[in-house]
């Protein structure tokens, strides 16, 4: 059976093995999918060892998405723009890099949550690999404005500069600011938390004024890691959504790249949501 994995640090919490096992069952594809913990200073070596052991491809999660892009011998246009990759495909000596995070996030917001992004005001919290991977596809939905707020403003500015031409072409206003900047007080229709702060139990890094009444507030994390953000969003009148739908949708995109078959992602999302919701909250 063909071997795939999700690689990151941490990675023990990942639901990706269950998702891809269900995709394989539903499509009749012969594959095995596992978790691979990579040392913080040993991502490239772990990838090479996995490929040498017969691996056909891997998903990449925090904190290695920039390293995954740099490791590739070929990059999709989305990876070249973002400088970050979450999907690697091994083709002979080539390492092909893709980023399915953005299409997965857009599909979850527009299709699963039923929220149109065109003409809306969006706030993207964070400027790391996760944010970089979704910015291009978000711009492609032609919102009115996207603001990237980050603790280190220079990183947010670099991200906006890299995407400036795409934003101009789409007619999207693109801005960078600090986490406590005055422009955040105007409020947003959609707020996406792309930071890994929730993994460490940190608080929400922006004020509640970023939320327009009834705004969609989505954390890319899921399970206990996202709970603090979701509770904060609900307490301030927002529609709270975790990253489970994005996870399933980006996995479906990766599966299509690897196997040439698109699984029925909504079926798997409904099943996985029932499993996650059945876990007692501590």
Image (spheres, grey):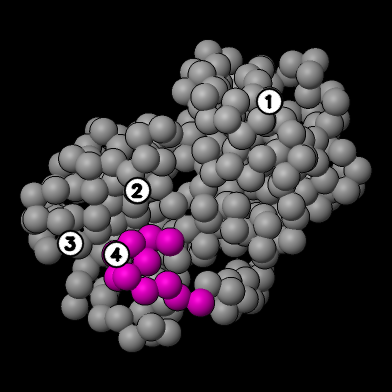
Residue receiving disc 3: 55
254 within the magenta span? yes
| Front residue (pair 132, 5) | 132
Determine crowd level at label 4: few under 14, some 14-19, many 20+ residues with C-alpha closer than 10 A: some
Residue at label 2? 98
Vertical side of 16 occupied by 47: above or below: above
Q: Quadrant of the N terminus?
A: bottom left
How far apart marks 3 and 2 lie (CA) works out to 17 Å
Marks 2 and 4 sit apart, C-alpha to C-alpha, by 11 Å
Q: Is residue 261 left or right of residue 103?
A: left
In this rendering, the label closer to the viewer, 2 or 1: 1
Rendered residue at 37%/74% (across/down): 261
Q: Which mark is residue 133?
A: none
User: Is the residue under label 3 in contact with that under label 4 (CB below 8 Å)?
Assistant: no
Q: Are marks 2 and 1 in contact (CB under 8 Å)?
A: no
Of residues 13 and 49, the one drawn nearer to the viewer in this rendering: 49
Answer yes or no: is residue 58 visible.
Answer: yes
Residue visible at 18% across and 40% down? 73
In the displayed structure, does residue 207 sit left or right of residue 203? Answer: right
Q: Nearer the viewer, residue 95 or 43?
A: 95
Instruction: Identify the mark nearer the N-term, 4 or 3.
Output: 3
In the picture of the structure, the residue carrying the numbered disc 4 is 258
Q: Secondary structure at mark 1?
A: strand
Helix, strand or loop under label 2: strand
Q: Earlier in the sequence, mark 1 or mark 4?
A: 1
Q: Nearer the viewer, mark 4 or mark 3?
A: 4
For marks 2 and 4 on the same chain, the one whose residue lies earlier in the sequence: 2
Which residue does the numbered mark 1 point to in the structure image?
173
Nearest to the eye among marks 3 and 2: give it: 2
The residue carrying pointer 1 sits among few (fewer than 14), some (14 to 19) or many (20 or more) residues within 10 Å by Cα, namely: some
Do the residues bearing badges 2 and 4 touch, measured as CB atoms within 8 Å? no
């Amino acid at each position: 059976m063909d071997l795939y994995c999700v690689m990151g640090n941490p990675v023990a919490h990942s639901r990706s093995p269950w998702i891809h096992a269900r995709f394989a069952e539903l499509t009749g594809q012969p594959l095995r999918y596992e978790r691979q913990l990579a040392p913080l200073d040993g991502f490239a070596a772990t990838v090479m060892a996995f490929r040498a052991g017969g691996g056909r491809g891997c998903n990449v999660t925090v904190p290695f998405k920039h390293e995954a892009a740099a490791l590739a011998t070929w990059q999709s246009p989305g990876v070249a723009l973002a400088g970050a990759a979450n999907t690697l495909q091994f083709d002979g000596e080539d390492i092909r890099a893709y980023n399915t995070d953005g299409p997965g996030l857009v599909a979850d917001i527009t299709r699963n949550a039923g929220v149109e992004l065109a003409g809306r005001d969006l706030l993207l919290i964070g400027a790391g690999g996760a944010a970089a991977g979704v910015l291009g596809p978000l711009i492609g939905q032609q919102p009115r404005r996207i603001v990237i707020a980050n603790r280190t403003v220079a990183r947010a500015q670099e991200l906006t500069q890299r995407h400036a031409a795409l934003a101009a072409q789409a007619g999207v206003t693109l801005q960078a600011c600090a986490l406590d900047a005055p422009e955040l007080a105007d409020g947003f229709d959609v707020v996406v938390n792309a930071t890994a702060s929730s993994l460490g139990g940190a608080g929400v890094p922006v004020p509640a004024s970023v939320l327009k009444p009834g705004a969609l507030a989505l954390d890319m994390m899921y399970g206990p890691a996202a709970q603090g953000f979701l509770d904060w969003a609900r307490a301030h009148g927002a529609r709270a959504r975790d990253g489970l739908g994005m996870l399933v949708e980006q996995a479906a995109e990766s599966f299509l790249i690897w196997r040439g078959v698109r699984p029925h992602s909504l079926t798997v999302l409904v099943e996985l949501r029932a499993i996650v919701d059945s876990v007692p909250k501590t």
